[in-house]
Amino acid sequence: MADKRRFDLFADLLVARYPGALRVFDVAGGMGMLNEALTLRGRTCTTYDVRHKRLPGLKFEERLFTLDEPCGADLVVGMHADGATRLIVEYAGKHGIPFAVVPCCSDNSMPYKPWMRHLKELGESLGMQVDEVELPMGGRARVLLGR
Ligand SMILES: C[S@@+](CC[C@H](N)C(=O)[O-])C[C@H]1O[C@@H](n2cnc3c(N)ncnc32)[C@H](O)[C@@H]1O
């Protein structure tokens, strides 16, 4: 069971690490809980997901996020974004913006530790410096921060 505190903890980290990033793309954001947490912290956030069930009043694009999405963000992020996690790193590299992901399942059955290593190396291969920190919560809590 994923930790319910994850959205507030991640939002606090994002605001602290990227104070100038006012427009955020929240990829694979489920029903918009991270969007809500970021909006409360003064960010303009757009969530991309195909889920019909969502929190009211949020900027939400009900479709799959792709590399072709026009870039209107200062930061692209994903909490437990599963198959979209790699895409977030690639999108950041393509558009020259920072990223932050809390990886969970890989898109190719890779176990967790190699998956983390792979994503870090992917970001570095795209010219970014990638740091790793851990959120104080249960479950998959390690964060990759690229800039
Ligand atoms: C494990 S859920 C996590 C949802 C939410 N971030 C959370 O932490 O509760 C993974 C989500 O990724 C979404 N997803 C996967 N690939 C996507 C893509 N390319 N674009 C948008 N959403 C995607 C799925 O629809 C699903 O809601």
Image (spheres, grey):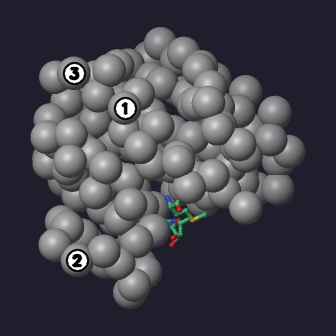
* Type of the residue with mark 1: Asp
Answer left or right for 147 relative to 87.
left
Mark 2 to mark 3: distance in Å?
26 Å
Crowding near pointer 3: few (<14 within 10 Å), some, many (20+)?
Answer: few
Cα distance between the residues tagged 1 and 3: 10 Å
Image quadrant where residue 75 sits: top left
Distance CA(mark 2)–CA(mark 1):
22 Å
Q: Amino acid at mark 2?
A: Pro
Residue 56: assigned label: 2
Q: Is residue 111 left or right of residue 27?
A: right
Q: Position of residue 24 (x, y in %)?
A: 24, 44
Which residue is tagged 1?
12
Residue depicted at x 58% and y 30%: 135
Mark 2 near ligand 1 (CB under 8 Å)?
no
Q: Quadrant of the N terminus?
A: bottom right
Q: Which mark is residue 19?
A: 3
Q: Secondary structure at mark 2?
A: loop
Q: Which of the marked residues, 2 or 3, is nearer the chain's N terminus? A: 3
Q: Nearer the viewer, mark 2 or mark 3?
A: 2
